[in-house]
Amino acid sequence: MIVVTGGGGFLGGAIVRQLRARGEVVRSVQRSAAPQLLEIGAEVVRADLSDARACLAALAGADAVVHVAAKAGVWGSEASFVAANVTATDNVIAACRELGIQRLVYTSTPSVVHSGGDVANIDESAPVATHFSAPYPRTKAIAEAHVLAANGATLATVALRPHLIWGPGDTQLTARVLDRARTGRLRLVGGGEKWIDSVYIDNAAAAHVNALDRLAPGAPCAGRAYFITQGEPMPQKQLINGMLAAAGLPPCQKSIAPGVAWLAGAILEAIWTVLRRADEPMMTRFLAHQLATAHWYDISAARRDLGYAPAVTVAQGLEKLRESLVTARARLPADR
C-alpha cells in the first residue's frame, strides 16, 4: 500500500489518481474530507500529521509514502508553517523508521535555493539559501534537509522540487491569475519579462510516481533533490497570457515596477499584521521578489535518474485548461 499525504490537494490528488489508475492500493491522509478520492477507490484517513501519534497510525501498513502535505502560501504565522512543514515531516520520517517503511518521496520546492536574485538554468548543485524572506521557503528548506539526511540503508528518501504547478482544478496559481484578471487587479511585475519555468499538473504527478518507482536504498536518486519543471522556460507574461487566453480573457497589458511591488508588499504586510488578518495580502515582499526575478532550472538530473520526461507540453496543457474551463462554464446553468 502507498500512502499519499495531502491527497485531497491539487498535486496530491493527481498523484493518487495516477497510482490508482495503474491498480495501486492507495491511502490518502489529509485534514479534510475527500469524497472524490473515495469514488476512485482510495482509502481516506483524516489526520493532523503534526501529531506524532496520529501520524504513526495514519502510516501503519504502508510500503511507501509520498509526503505532499504542507502549508504553502505567502502569509501566516511562523509557528503554523513550522508545525505543518517541519514537525509533520519529522513525524513522517519517524513513523517510516518505526514502521519499517523503506521508501519516502518528499515534495519540496525550488524556493529553497532562492536567495532573492535571478535563478537561471541552475541545477541541483546550487546551494540551499541561507536567508529567506518568508516562513514557507524557510520551513520547506529545513524539512527537505531532514528528509535527505534520513536517507540510509533501511529508509530511502528523495526530494522533488516542482515549480509553479498549474492546470485544470488548480485553486492557487491558475485561479488567482484568472480572478485578478477578471476583477482588473492583475499586474505584470516588471512587464512580466523575466523568464520562468513551470510544470503542468500531470507532469508533476508523474515525476512523483517515477521517483517512487526508482527509489530504493542505494539507488542513484536516493538522498538527492531534483528540480521538476516543463523544461520550457519562457517570459512570465507568456505563461500568464496563455492562461488568460485559455479562459477567453484578453492579455494583461498593465505593469508595475518591481520596487513599487516590493513597497506595496511591505505596506500590506504591516497592515495585515496590525489588523491580525489571517487571509493573504494581494502582495507581500516575498511574492514581489518571486515575480520580479527569473526562475528556471536544469532538469537533466531528473530526466537521467527518475526517467522524467514531461508528457504534456505547455501548449497542450493550456489547451487542456481551456477545455476544462469551457466544460465548467457549460455546467453552470444546470447547477443554478
Image (cartoon, rainbow, N blue to C red):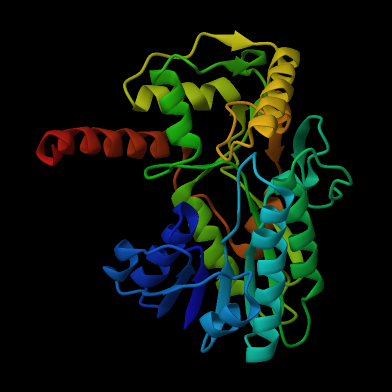
Q: Is 145 placed above or below 198 here?
A: below
Q: Position of residue 178 (x, y in %)?
A: 42, 27
Q: Is residue 284 left or right of residue 2?
A: right
Q: Residue at x 67, y 49 (%)?
A: 299
Q: Is 296 placed above or below 193 here?
A: below
Q: How many marks?
A: 0
Q: Is residue 268 left or right of residue 318?
A: right
Q: Position of residue 44 (x, y in %)?
A: 39, 73
Farthest residue in the right direction? 130
Q: Is residue 285 left or right of residue 312?
A: right
Please indicate, yes or no, whether residue 287 appears anywhere in the rendered image.
no
Q: Residue at x 77, y 76 (%)?
A: 151
Q: Is residue 301 left or right of residue 20?
A: right
Figure quadrant of the C terminus: top left
Please indicate, yes or no, whether residue 59 appears anywhere in the rendered image.
yes
Q: Quadrant of residue 142?
A: bottom right
Q: Residue at x 35, y 27 (%)?
A: 246
Q: Is 11 placed above or below 266 here?
A: below
Farthest residue in the front direction? 275
Q: Residue at x 87, y 49 (%)?
A: 127
Residue nearer the viewer, 92 or 80: 80
Residue nearer the viewer, 246 or 41: 41
Q: Position of residue 71 (x, y in %)?
A: 60, 53
Q: Quadrant of residue 76?
A: top right
Q: Position of residue 311 (x, y in %)?
A: 46, 50
Farthest residue in the left direction? 334
